[in-house]
Amino acid sequence: MRSLRARLLLVTSVLLAGALAIVGVILDESVRAALDEEQRELLDSKIIMLLAVAEPSQEQSLTFPPDLPEQRFNTPGSGLYAKVRDRSGAFLWRSESALGLTFDPDTPLPAPGEQVYVRQQTSNGDTLLTVTLGVVWTFDDDTERYFALSAAESERAIIAPLERFRGQMFAAFALVAIALLIGMGLVLSWLLRPLGQIAGEISAVESGHRAALSDEYPSELSGVARNLNALMRSEQRRTERYQQTLANLGDDEAAQPVHSQLQRMEQIVRYQLSRSAITTGRTVGKTRVPVFDEVSQMLGALDKVYRSKNVRGEIEMPADLVFQGDKGDLVEILGNLLDNAYKWCRQRVLIVGLEDAGLNLVIEDDGPGVPADAVAAALRRGTRLDETVPGSGIGLAVVAELVAQYGGKLEIRRSDLGGAAVHLNFPRS
Amino acid sequence: MRLLVVEDDDALRESLTQQLLAEGYRVESAADGQEGLYFAREYPIDLAIIDLGLPGLPGIDLIKQLRGSGHNYPVLILTARDGWQDKVDGLQAGADDYVSKPFHFPEVSARINALLRRAGGWGSAILDCGEVRLDTAAQTLFVSDEEIDLTSFEYQLLEYLMMRAGEVVSKTELTERLYDQDYERDSNVIEVFIGRLRKKLDPDNVTKPIETLRGRGYRFALERNVQE
């Protein structure tokens, strides 16, 4: 239940169902009682009607006209019955409708002037509500005789309207429930709209389309919006202060450590990205890069940069020597190493390449060289052996990492020319 | 000297421009390759600083078009530190030097200075003619080993003339290179400053370091001393 709307709708539905069930039971009971009462009154009136049409007979009994005013008494199986019994319980008369019906046990015989109501089963499986009135009839010869007059009606007469009522009630309740739930849903979306609005405005602020949240919120949310605005303003001021501080640092000496740290961070990110590019590239298959072409292009470029130095760059390698791998990696390695060689040499740079247990490259110069005890430091990131010459101190470290990725070796030795000799070996796989 | 900066990163372009202005250069700046090409062709530029990753027109193409239309002033490219392929491509397209990003401004400044000197045929930061020695790194002037104070404008004017020592430089060229474009161009001002420079360089009117060529301009006339 992650949604407020779903939670509220669930709770509302359960409460609504419970309330409607209780109301339904009460209504059902009272309607049933009313129908029951109505049936009794109907039967009472039938008894009165029977008394009104009864005629005394010669045999000191009661007779009824064959055509009673209530047609249902005259129709067999109509559900409305009448009967007359004497003191012994023997039938003196029964209505046309009751012919063939037996009542077992029969209804009790009430005292004169009393009325009893019973429910009883008939031989055809029906349930009847029976009203019996005890009367004492005085004949013309002043003799008195006891009679029990009964009127009975099948329960089916009240079950049909009850069922009809239940059907209507369910339909009405269902309509009410649906209307309530829909209304609740509408109210909820109206209530929750400010929350959606605040979410939309926050993402607009994030994407830069808004500067702050609006102040048109209901009182319950306006505090949240105000606090968020305050938070964003302070965040913005903090960022501005940072930028100001960084700008103030500029190229001051004090900023140098920050700069080199930033450079290192940038370098690490680039390196990791390029490494992932290499590994994916390898699955496609290595390319064969002609080394001589790359070296001579690099020398042409560096000759231009170091034009005033008049460096004599020489290449000694077979023209068909190839590097197996990414061209960009080879260019990166050559660029860093040759740039170092041009930077440090006096006049000469020599690049030797040969195929022997893989690809071997040696980059030599006639500069001051790298002292043996400084080789390890030279390969470390951020180390600059001579602080007076511009450089980032990461070129050699990047080369070492690239060479290692190809499973190769990098060694710094002394060149016969007098300066440094960087030996590279890339094994053939 | 009028420089062109073509860089799409607003913060970097702005800070580079401000620092170059503070060094006494006139600066035009462009945020994309097309705008850069317009400035590069239509303005009197002495050196262009071009970022290779430009929107609109890539830096490499900008340099090729620039060179193709006969503009030979030095071009310094800005590249990513590990962008060696870019550096090689840029230099082959006609650039003269590169600086890797992120850079320290003094490094850029030193490269610009070196390129400008090289374009004028100078091998070092010190422009040395006769008894006049102008240190372009320290921006100081020595005449017969005696330091002479110059105002910023006097320095810019003398540097421009000495960079091109032996060549004729027209008044128009000087006003274009030394004034902001929206500044009132009055060539009389140049004459006044030339007069002041002559007094400072040659108070006794003996060596005559700055020649006036009627209707053509000025020439720094002292012989360049051969550097060892």
Image (cartoon, coloured by chain):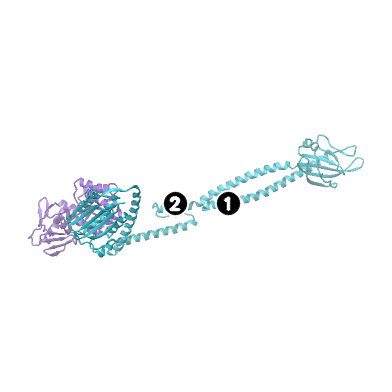
Chain colours: A cyan, B purple
- Give the image location of residue A285, x and y in percent: 33, 47
- Quadrant for the C terminus of chain B in the image: bottom left
**Which of the 4 image quadrants contains residue B219?**
bottom left
At label 2, counting other C-alpha atoms closer than 10 Å, the crowd grade (few under 14, some 14-19, many 20 or more) is few
Direction from residue B105 to residue B228 in the image, left or right: left
Q: Is residue B24 visible to us here?
A: no
Query: Which of the image's four quarters has the N terminus of chain B?
Result: bottom left
Residue A265 found in image quarter: bottom left
Per the model, the C-alpha gap separating discs 1 and 2 is 28 Å
From the viewer's perspective, is residue A200 above or below residue A121? Answer: below
Badge count: 2
Q: Which residue in the structure is indicated by mark 1?
A: A12
- Three-letter residue code for mark 2: Gly
Q: Nearer the viewer, residue B40 or A422?
A: A422
Badge number at residue A156: none
Mark 1, secondary structure of its residue: helix
Question: In the rendered structure, which disc, 1 or 2, sits on the residue that comes first in sequence?
Answer: 1
User: Which percent across, then down, holds residue A319?
Assistant: 22, 48
Residue A143 percent coordinates (x, y): 91, 42
Instruction: State the residue at coordinates (88%, 37%).
Output: A57
Is B173 or A206 nearer to us in this picture? A206
Amino acid at the residue labelled 1: Thr
